Image (cartoon, rainbow, N blue to C red):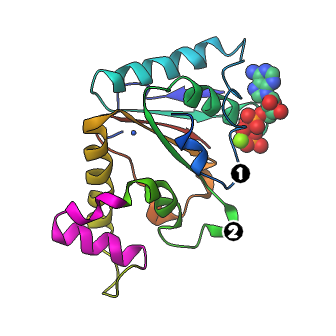
Amino acid sequence: MTRDSAGSDPAAGGPSSWLFRSRGGWGGPGAGSGLLDRQAERAAIDRVLASARDGFSATLVIRGSAGVGKTALLGYAADSAADMRVCGVTGIETEIGLAFAALHQLLVPFLDGIGELPIPQRLALRVAFGMEQGPAADRFLVGLAALTLLARAAEDQPVLCLIDDGQWLDAESAQRPGPRCCAARSS
Ligand SMILES: Nc1ncnc2c1ncn2[C@@H]1O[C@H](COP(=O)(O)OP(=O)(O)OP(=O)(O)O)[C@@H](O)[C@H]1O
Ligand SMILES: [Mg+2]
């Protein structure tokens, strides 16, 4: 298993809220906190979480072969972030062609803030998510809207975004979360 960019990515994102993600699973609360090994990986996750608590964004990418324990580490991250707002999404192979499907899943808990977005970002996100008719959504504006939603949420509480099976994310969703967020991605 390899890891990269722990705590150093400037563009990077409680246990009850991360369960909103119903597709797949990280095994539920407690699934990752019982890990006795994986010390280096757990330390890397701890650093990312500490960075988010200090107000900095960070991204951690977890890569490894099938069944090696990537999802379990995401569970560890979730269980270690009781003081954070935890959200997440799992990439689904059959949805890889559905534009913005994964981003929609990730942002559902934050959509009550959509009305406060700058108008171009709001329109782009609403069109991308099928909430409004309009020309094809501008990917930059959609990404910006996602960043804005997450950044505003992170002003109140650090946000942890967990992305599992990242290899199956649709291309339009495969953009980075924002300030004071951290993300663990299994791919
Ligand atoms: N450090 C560990 N010690 C013991 N068992 C573990 C450990 N990590 C994971 N497991 C167990 O191994 C199995 C596979 O783990 P997990 O689902 O996290 O792997 P994965 O890398 O996400 O797999 P996939 O590539 O299929 O998504 C699970 O039953 C899990 O509980
Ligand atoms: Mg997995």
Spot occupied by residue 121 in the image (x, y as percentages of width and height): 23, 67
Pick the front one: 23 or 113: 113
Residue occupying image coordinates x 60% and y 51%: 21
Name the kind of residue labelled 1 in the image.
Gly
> Which residue in the structure is indicated by mark 1?
24
State the image quarter where residue 49 is shown.
top left
The quadrant of the rendering that contains the N terminus is top right
Which badge, 2 or 1, is on the more N-terminal residue?
A: 1
Residues at marks 2 and 1 touching, judged by CB atoms closer than 8 Å: no
Ligand number 2: quarter of image: top right
Pick the front one: 59 or 20: 20
Kindly identify which numbered label has been placed on residue 132.
Answer: none
Spot occupied by residue 140 in the image (x, y as percentages of width and height): 28, 64
Question: Relative to 146, is 34 above or below?
Answer: above
Spot occupied by residue 187 in the image (x, y as percentages of width and height): 62, 44
Q: Residues within 10 Å of mark 2 (few under 14, many from 20)?
A: few
Residue occupying image coordinates x 61% and y 33%: 74
Name the kind of residue labelled 2 in the image.
Thr
Ligand 2 neighbours mark 1 (CB distance < 8 Å): yes
State the image quarter where residue 62 is shown.
top right
Spot occupied by residue 33 in the image (x, y as percentages of width and height): 66, 20
Pick the front one: 154 or 3: 154
Q: Nearer the viewer, mark 2 or mark 1?
A: 1
Residue 68 relative to residue 63: left or right: right
Q: Is residue 81 visible?
A: yes
> Which residue in the structure is indicated by mark 2?
94
Q: Is residue 102 magenta?
A: no
Residue at the limit of the structure toward the left, as seen here: 118
The magenta span reads: 112-130
Secondary element at tag 1: loop
